[in-house]
Amino acid sequence: MAAQPQSNNRLSLVGSVRPELQGDPRDRARAVYKFIEEMKFSRCLAELPAVARIECPECKRKRQFYCYDCLTVTNPPSHPDRVSLPLNLHVILHKDEHRSKATSLPLATISPDVKIHVYPTIPEPAVSEGGENTANANTNTLQPNETVLLYPSETATDIEDLTAEDLAQIKNLIV
């Protein structure tokens, strides 16, 4: 199974520190710079037209493409089409992270399958302290055997060790 309840009924962790993230930070910086240099864009980024800030219909603040407070699109012509994901994506933001700088927030404006949570509010597993299943149709609780938390840890299961059956069971991804 993709995620197993641990003794404290929390979800187990899946993921590991990628080899390319280990080692000298200067080597990593050079690799990132080379990657960006080799990217091919359909248009030169400097030639993209400037887009005016438009009032958010919800909170009335002026935002350029979307409101990072309300997660409302403010400039529909420049916004990508909505997409449906094959699973639910739960993003946990740090409580002190500036929403205007959070790179995950735009995801919630293009997919109804993306849920943003601000720590300490996090999605809860559907297992009580006694170990019984507490999920029902009216809650947003997560089944441990259908949920994966991506987080690097020495004790994490490497995602490459999951079988096709394990991956097919995943309905919720937490990052």
Image (tube, rainbow, N blue to C red):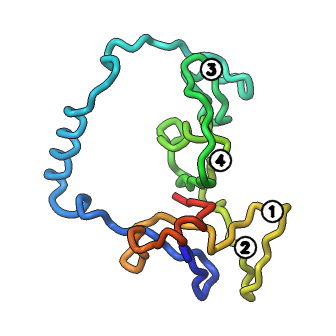
Per the image, the residue denoted by label 4 is 113
User: In the rendered structure, which disc, 2 or 3, sits on the residue that comes first in sequence?
Assistant: 3
Disc 1 and disc 3 in contact, CB within 8 angstroms: no
User: In the rendered structure, which disc, 4 or 1, sits on the residue that comes first in sequence?
Assistant: 4
Mark 1 is surrounded, within 10 Å at the Cα level, by few (under 14), some (14 to 19) or many (20 or more) other residues, namely: few
Per the image, the residue denoted by label 2 is 126
Tag nearer the camera, 4 or 2: 4
Mark 4 is surrounded, within 10 Å at the Cα level, by few (under 14), some (14 to 19) or many (20 or more) other residues, namely: some
User: In the rendered structure, which disc, 4 or 3, sits on the residue that comes first in sequence?
Assistant: 3
Q: Nearer the viewer, residue 97 or 154?
A: 154
Q: CA distance from mark 1 to mark 2?
A: 9 Å
Find residue 163 and report its horizontal and vertical position in percent.
47, 72
Q: Amino acid at mark 2?
A: Ala
Q: CA distance from mark 4 to mark 2?
A: 19 Å
Which quarter of the rendering shows the N terminus? bottom right
Find residue 61 and report its horizontal and vertical position in percent.
65, 24
Q: Is residue 65 above or below residue 51?
A: below
Per the image, the residue denoted by label 1 is 139
Q: Amino acid at mark 4?
A: Asp
Element type where label 3 sits in the image: helix
Disc 1 and disc 2 in contact, CB within 8 angstroms: yes
Residue 76 tag number: 3
Residue depicted at x 79% and y 76%: 134
Element type where label 2 sits in the image: loop
Q: CA distance from mark 4 to mark 1?
A: 16 Å
Q: Quadrant of residue 140?
A: bottom right
Q: Quadrant of residue 81?
A: top right
Residue depicted at x 51% and y 58%: 175
Q: Amino acid at mark 1?
A: Thr
Q: CA distance from mark 2 to mark 3?
A: 37 Å
Tag nearer the camera, 4 or 1: 4
